[in-house]
Amino acid sequence: MNYPERFNEIRCYSDAEASFVISQIFARPEIKKILAYVLGEDYAEYFLRTLPEMKTIDDFQRIVIIPVLMAIEHKTCTSVTLNGSEKINKEKGALYLTNHRDIVLDSAFLNIHLYLKGFNTSQIGIGNNLLIQPWIEHAVKLNKSFIVRRNGSIKEQLLISKNLSEYIRYVITERKDAVWLAQREGRAKDSNDVTQSSIIKMLNMSSKLSFVESVNELNITPIAINYEYDACDFLKAKEFQLKRDNPQYKKSPMDDLLSMQTGLIAPKGRVSYNVCDPIVAPEEWNELTKNEQVSLLTAEIDKRIHANYILYPNNYVAADLLTNSNKFSDKYTQKDEEKFISYVDKQLNKVDIPNPDFPFLRHMIYTMYANPVLNQEIALKK
């Protein structure tokens, strides 16, 4: 099935385009360097020398992407688990809406473990701000990514959002494929995972159905993600101080590149994905105002994500350190606490800015690890 022409600027590549684009990608000198970085120089050369012919997107993912990402997983993670996959219907398209921790790996690890469990990999929404060089756009579109364009005037953004909304709905309802989308634009740097209302409004732009029918057609399936160690925690803390000290501060493309590199190569400990029940909007929502409808849906998404985090001892340690209490002390040992404090000390030493405010930076890192605990506590009481 060919994609409608109106999606040409944002869609992922099709099987008909795969062979040519694959040959172009592997002609790039950067690819050998990246593979050498991930796989080691000797194995990267062997890997490239023995690559079989690839004619489809599935060939590319199965032969290149999955092995490379599994190598990253084995090098940097104690484990990665996907729980609740029985809630996914293979016969239906779905919108996997997740919290957002790591620029690259949130969707990448999810796709690996969907694939290993016999599911099709999802299409991935990726911001064009991350496409620092043209070849990167070709590479991600080859890996079933579609482009979320974030530049343009207000009028242009409305047209861009409508086109994006139509594409997502087309992929889910017509192609019966899954789409991965973060619940907000950019990562929640303090791990306070809250769905942006603008995401829901964008998704609804492509439907002439009632709000309830529009939502249910997308088969929205929230997924809760948690990393035992957030490889970019010190970079996020650094950004908090830079923004505190200079409200006009904005990250550069090189900052995003550093976050991507750090997220890929630094240790992450245990990583978990917990699939929530798909959301079925009740008919009575149709009687509400648009703002009330959006508010109820975002609250339901947040509640499911918060309630379904798989938490680790360091999350509970951080919650007690942040609140100066021992409320969660039954969830960890003294050794867990000492290990986490030592880890945070090492991360703080990586912050490379003039006049680092270490008490503030420490507070922000504690906040990142504590918020999933605090939010889950609230969600489970509702």
Image (spheres, rainbow, N blue to C red):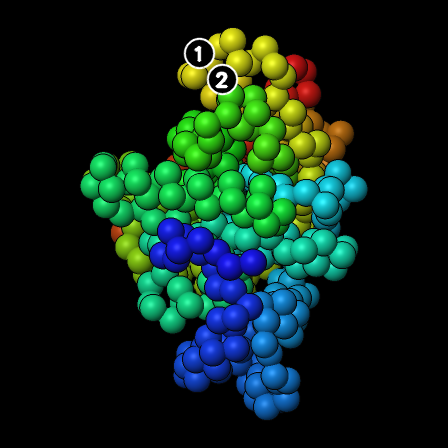
Q: Residue at x 51, y 44 (%)?
A: 170
Q: Residue at x 48, y 71 (%)?
A: 17
Q: Horizontal and vertical percent for residue 360?
A: 39, 37
Residue 107: percent from the left, percent from the top? Answer: 56, 52
* Helix, strand or loop status at disc 1: loop
Residue 289's label in the rendered image is 1
Pick the quarter of the image with the N terminus: bottom right
Q: Are marks 1 and 2 in contact (CB under 8 Å)?
A: yes
Q: For the point 23% across and 45% down, which residue is it?
A: 152
For image coordinates 51% across by 22% down, the residue present is: 211
Q: Is residue 90 left or right of residue 13?
A: right
> In the picture, residue 79 is in which quadrant?
bottom right
Left-right relation of 82 to 375:
right
Q: From the viewer's perspective, is residue 143 above or below residue 281?
A: below
Residue 337, numbered circle: none
Q: Nearer the viewer, residue 212 or 137?
A: 212
Identify whether 126 is placed above or below 207: below
- Which amino acid type is shown beneath numbered disc 2? Gln
Q: Look at the image and tell me whether residue 317 can be seen.
A: no
Label 2 element class: helix
Estimate the spatial distance between the alpha carbons at disc 1 and disc 2, rounded to whole Å.
Answer: 6 Å
Q: Amino acid at mark 1?
A: Thr
Which quarter of the picture shows residue 212? top right
Q: Nearer the viewer, residue 304 or 257?
A: 304
329 vs 276, nearest the viewer: 276
Q: Can see residue 208?
A: yes
Instruction: Give the percent coordinates (x, y) of residue 350.
Output: 43, 56
Residue bearing the label numbered 2: 293
